[in-house]
Image (cartoon, coloured by chain):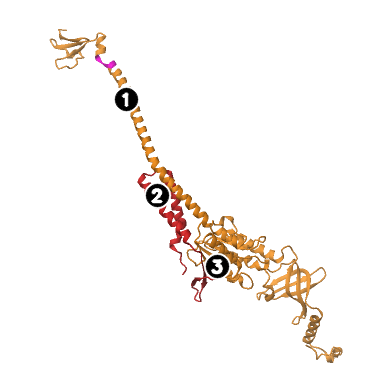
């Protein structure tokens, strides 16, 4: 690089350097004189290009430096920084020859703010999920009490899977575990998990799904904070238990799941009833069944007795009422009897056929009729009026 | 294609039915014939359920997708 250039050769116009020669030389000087270093400052004019590269300026009160962070370096970060954010950059100072511009090629970027970029990315994705109602507590589905087919989305060689298998085998061996193997951390884990979840949606007869991994650093767990993973979890057709092993940090996956468990073992416990409990419940049901029938046979006799009592009681009451009615009727009949009236001195005229004669026209002169008085009949004849 | 095992799908329903039988028997609203019939059904379901619980051995399988995108279920030996 420019070894052929003599630094003292360009002191006259004849020895003039080309622009390219100068920038190349300047770049060599900068890169040799300023080794990769940490710089702190404030982000300004941030722009993410279509290519995935990030461009921005880092500045303080009196100066600024152009910065680039290439896609191969920035893809490890959970989110782009925002203008105004205070950051630490680990960067290689260089000179961009095409523009003759001094700049930093950023290799790593840490926010000095609480939680930093991770927190920022988390809050952004969380807000997006909340906006779509995916964090609504009303979305939480109850777990089936006796699951028979449980899908497990996790690493096939992690301790998490072994724990889930062990707990299920001990508590509820009735269930069949279907493992959907996937990597749970590192480059591309996000896509793999989403693919496993898509596969899960096609398995028939599932009762429940567990998604998770054992504990790890925040970076290790980050796969479960991707908005895409969270959305795929929220879209599962069966209830989901999330067990991303970390007590303190809740992941987005935890937030959209129907139940959050602290560890994979706890997830398997939440997913399954204890066989011993179910057997005890069965024994209890059996006892109730027997008592129910025994009670029934006793009850039949008891009920017959009761029915008989009720029946005879009703009959007696009815008879009593009839007796009352009858004596009342007799009294009323007695009062209405014509004999009572005759006693008071009235008489009843009747013709030979026994018809009662009530009007003058019914007594033509010479008509024979009978008079009924209180103690018997008297023969009578109508005279001339 | 991974299919649900029909003999197991009904486990929760079987327990529900058992509960229902016991409740009806306890309610004492049936005639003796019906009660006996229910009792026998209850005993049978109880036996089945118990067998199911005690005979089971946890099965672990893994679900993969072949090149054509079809589901493949195979035994898992982790």
Residue A126, which numbered label? none
Spatial CA distance of label 3 from label 1 is 83 Å
Between residue A70 and residue A236, name the one nearer to us.
Answer: A236
Residue sitting nearer the eye, A214 or B67: A214
Q: Name the disc covering residue A322, or none.
A: 1
Q: Regarding mark 1 in the picture, which secondary structure is present there?
A: helix
Residue A270 against residue A193 in the figure, above or below: above
x, y percent for residue A256 = 59, 60
Q: Chain of mark 3?
A: A
| The colour assigned to chain A within the rendered structure | orange
Q: Is residue A101 left or right of residue A329?
A: right
Q: Could you tell me if the residues under marks 3 and 1 are in contact, i.e. CB atoms within 8 Å?
A: no
Q: Position of residue A305 (x, y in %)?
A: 37, 35
The residue located at (29%, 19%) in the rendering is A330
Residue at 52%, 72% in the rendered image: B64
State the residue at coordinates (37%, 49%): B37
């Amino acid at each position: 690089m420019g070894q052929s250039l003599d630094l003292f050769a360009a002191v006259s116009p004849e020895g003039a350097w080309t622009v390219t020669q100068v920038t190349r030389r300047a770049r060599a000087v900068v890169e040799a004189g300023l080794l990769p270093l940490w710089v702190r400052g404030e982000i300004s004019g941030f722009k993410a290009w279509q290519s995935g590269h990030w461009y921005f300026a880092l500045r303080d009160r009196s100066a600024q430096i152009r910065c680039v962070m290439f896609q191969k370096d920035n893809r490890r970060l959970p989110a782009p920084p925002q203008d105004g954010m205070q950051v630490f950059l680990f960067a290689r100072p260089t000179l961009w020859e095409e523009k003759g511009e001094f700049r930093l090629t950023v290799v790593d970027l840490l926010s000095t703010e609480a939680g930093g970029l991770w927190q920022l990315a988390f809050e952004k994705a969380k807000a997006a999920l909340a906006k779509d109602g995916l964090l609504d507590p009303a979305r939480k589905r109850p777990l089936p009490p006796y699951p028979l087919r449980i899908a497990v989305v996790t690493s096939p060689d992690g301790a998490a899977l072994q724990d889930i298998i062990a707990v299920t085998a001990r508590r509820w061996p009735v269930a069949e575990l279907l493992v959907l193997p996937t990597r749970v951390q590192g480059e591309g884990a996000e896509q793999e998990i989403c693919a496993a979840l898509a596969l899960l949606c096609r398995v028939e007869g599932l009762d429940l799904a567990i998604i998770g991994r054992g504990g790890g650093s925040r970076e290790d767990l980050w796969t479960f904070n991707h908005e895409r993973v969270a959305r795929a979890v929220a879209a599962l057709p069966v209830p989901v238990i999330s067990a991303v092993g970390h007590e303190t940090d809740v992941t987005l996956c935890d937030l959209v799941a129907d139940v959050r468990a602290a560890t994979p073992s706890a997830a398997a416990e939440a997913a399954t009833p204890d066989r011993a409990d179910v057997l005890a419940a069965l024994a209890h049901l059996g006892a109730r069944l027997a008592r129910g029938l025994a009670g029934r046979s006793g009850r039949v006799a008891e009920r017959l007795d009761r029915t008989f009592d009720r029946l005879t009681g009703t009959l007696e009451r009815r008879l009593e009422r009839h007796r009352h009615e009858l004596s009342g009727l007799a009294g009323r009949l007695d009062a209405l009897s014509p004999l009572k009236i005759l006693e008071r001195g009235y008489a009843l005229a009747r013709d030979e056929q026994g018809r009662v004669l009530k009007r003058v026209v019914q007594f033509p002169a010479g008509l024979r009729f009978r008079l009924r008085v209180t103690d018997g009949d008297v023969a009578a004849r109508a005279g001339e009026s | 294609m991974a299919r649900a095992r029909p003999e197991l799908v009904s486990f929760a329903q079987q327990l529900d039915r058992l509960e229902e039988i016991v409740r009806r028997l306890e309610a004492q609203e049936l005639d003796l014939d019906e009660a006996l019939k229910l009792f026998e059904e209850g005993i049978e379901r109880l036996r089945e359920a118990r067998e199911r619980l005690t005979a089971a051995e946890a099965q672990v399988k893994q679900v993969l997708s072949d090149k054509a995108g079809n589901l493949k279920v195979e035994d898992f030996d982790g």
